[in-house]
Amino acid sequence: MRSQLRDWDQAGLARALTAVARADVEVKGGGADPAYALERMVLQVAAARGHH
């Protein structure tokens, strides 16, 4: 677990959590395209990891 956490810094973690929260609102709130919201979230979380 610790080795997986090494690539995350505070700013990246904040970006990832923001992306997850935004996708949650779009999916549960009936956004125009929930599948796209999830796809965008996955890409944003992946980009946030190790983004120094």
Image: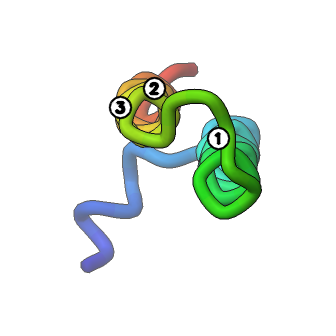
- Estimate how packed mark 1 is, as few (under 14), some (14 to 19) or many (20 or more) residues with alpha carbons within 10 Å: many
Can the viewer see residue 10 in this picture?
no
Mark 1: amino acid: Ala
- Estimate how packed mark 3 is, as few (under 14), some (14 to 19) or many (20 or more) residues with alpha carbons within 10 Å: few
Percent position of residue 35, x then y: 37, 38
Is the C-beta separation of discs 2 and 3 under 8 Å? yes
Q: Quadrant of the N terminus?
A: bottom left
Q: CA distance from mark 2 to mark 3?
A: 4 Å
Mark 2: amino acid: Arg
Say which residue label 1 marks. 19
Percent position of residue 41, x then y: 49, 37
Say which residue label 3 marks. 39
**Callout 2: SS:** helix
Task: Using the image as rendered, state which of residue 37 and residue 8 is in the foreground.
Answer: 37
Task: Using the image as rendered, state which of residue 26 and residue 4 is in the foreground.
Answer: 26
Q: CA distance from mark 1 to mark 2?
A: 8 Å
**Callout 1: SS:** helix
The label on residue 40 is 2
Q: Is residue 37 left or right of residue 10?
A: left
Q: Is residue 41 left or right of residue 21?
A: left
Is the C-beta separation of discs 1 and 2 under 8 Å? yes
